Image (cartoon, grey):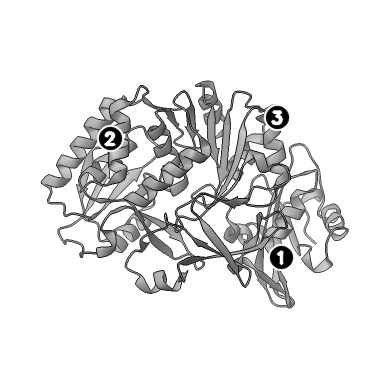
Amino acid sequence: MSGALAGIVADALRTASHDIESVEGKPYRPAESSDLADRVTRALNAAGLRADEPVLVRIGNRTSDIGSLLGVWQAGAVAVPAHIGAAPATLASLKGATGARFQIDGDQLQRFGEAVPPERPLLDGAALIIFTSGSTGQPKGVVVGHDRLARKLTVLDRLLSPRADDAVLVPLQMTFIFGLWVALLTLRAGARLILVPKFSGDAIARGLGMGATVLAGVPSMYRSLLASPGFVMPKLRLAMTGGEVLPRPLALALRKVAPNAALYDLFGLTETGTCDFVLGPDAQPDGFGSIGMPTESVEFRIEDGELQVCSPFAMLGYLDNPELTAASINDRYFKTGDLVRLRPDGHVELIGRAKDIVSRGGNKIAPLEIDNLICEHPGVAAALCAGVPDERLGEAIHAVVVPRGGVQMSVEHLRDWLSARTERYKVPDVIRFADALPAGSTGKADRRAVAALTRKPPARDASNEIE
């Protein structure tokens, strides 16, 4: 059977009055997408596809990608998104983890082998297997159900109110849940979908020039845009962000360059069905610094400082790992690994990830707290801290700091500024200035990559010296 998402996309294409567009490349007419999907379905069925079988789908935010996904779902298969630029080792890992025999790239079918993957009851009704990295960096296959994601789209439609006359600009890769649900919600609403294959300031400018009224991105993308002098988005009606914490200074700066846009900060995990919390425009600016309140039908609790979420839209489980699935759930509540506190106004405030906590000389420090404090400096655009092994302290705090354009700053000045505002043991031991924060494949800031930057020999510049 094809599943709920196939029905949503097929219906959207059947009634669509807009092409699927891109800031580069040709648009795809709705009928073209439907025809491509039918070709994919026929090819998979002719190749002997079995129900609920995983199929790799190459994704690059191309206008043809929607048709590819629809074709896989129509065939009754489970889509495993893989970026078109993925390294051979990554593809080999995905094939090994899923047992996939087939890959779809556009409407082209590639067969990897003849061995039929095992039957997995967990994949009954599944739409997607999305691989995310855990605390050890070992990818985990999150199985997303058709019906659960379809129902979450209904909730998001009520929350965000996309309109048929909107043009939604999506620089988020559709290999990940954030980019995918934004694209699906756009189609469901009958709005224009404008895809960005590769994020850049020029690409976003082209999309805005195409009449975009809605933009979805992670904070790192917005930081990059705001670094361009004179950048403004006056025609933007709605700005969505998520995937990482939205610092108050960045939120305020974003409101200035997009004065007519309602800003929605969304927080959630792939495992819990995405967008578990929202800080909407009605709660701003007093709510800045928090992740807001739970979205519709989502419940939460805080156990020993950890955020735990109960959602009817949550994953079906981790692929081939029932032990990890069971260990991640406590009496219906998913253990997120996020450390939070409840504010007097009822908002949930993120302190950091349990796995990120730094033990410096016996003192426990949340890097996110230091990130936020550094970003309060008027000359700082972004900051990212992490614990790095240290012979004397056990762990030292290293920080990568991105100054605002044109600002000259020394390590000594920033340390003095921080020392006046927090305990001495929380001031980073090593500070390195950079043009941008290290980012992972999703575009989110990558805390695990901090040490690789801070351990490099510093440039011989007075503003970049490390004590």
Q: Which amino acid type is marked by label 2?
A: Ala
* Image quadrant where one finds the C terminus: bottom right
Residue at the spot of label 2: 10
Residue at the spot of label 3: 229
The answer to whether residue 227 is seen in the rendering is no
In the image, residue 213 lies at what x, y percent?
A: 54, 26
Pointer 2 or 1: first along the chain: 2
In the image, residue 90 lies at what x, y percent?
A: 37, 56
Horizontal arrangement in the rendering, residue 367 relative to residue 5 (left or right): right
Horizontal arrangement in the rendering, residue 364 relative to residue 334 (left or right): right
Considering the numbered disc 3 on the image, is that residue within a helix, a strand or a loop?
loop
Say which quarter of the image contains residue 116: bottom left
Pointer 1 or 3: first along the chain: 3
Q: Which amino acid type is marked by label 1?
A: Ile
In whole angstroms, how far apart are the C-alphas of marks 2 and 3?
Answer: 42 Å
Residue 443 in the image: above or below residue 186: below
In whole angstroms, how far apart are the C-alphas of marks 1 and 3?
Answer: 32 Å
Assess disc 2: are there few (<14), some (14-19) or many (≥20) residues with their C-alpha within 10 Å of its C-alpha: many
In the image, residue 210 lies at what x, y percent?
A: 49, 21
Q: Are marks 2 and 3 in contact (CB under 8 Å)?
A: no
Residue shown at 53% from the left, 47% from the top = 443
Assess disc 3: are there few (<14), some (14-19) or many (≥20) residues with their C-alpha within 10 Å of its C-alpha: few
Pointer 2 or 3: first along the chain: 2
Q: Along the line of sight, which residue is nearer the eye, 158 or 187?
A: 158
In whole angstroms, how far apart are the C-alphas of marks 2 and 1?
Answer: 51 Å
Assess disc 1: are there few (<14), some (14-19) or many (≥20) residues with their C-alpha within 10 Å of its C-alpha: many
Horizontal arrangement in the rendering, residue 190 relative to residue 119 (left or right): right
Residue shown at 72% from the left, 39% from the top = 252
Q: Which amino acid type is marked by label 3?
A: Pro
Residue at the spot of label 1: 397
Horizontal arrangement in the rendering, residue 402 relative to residue 29 (left or right): right
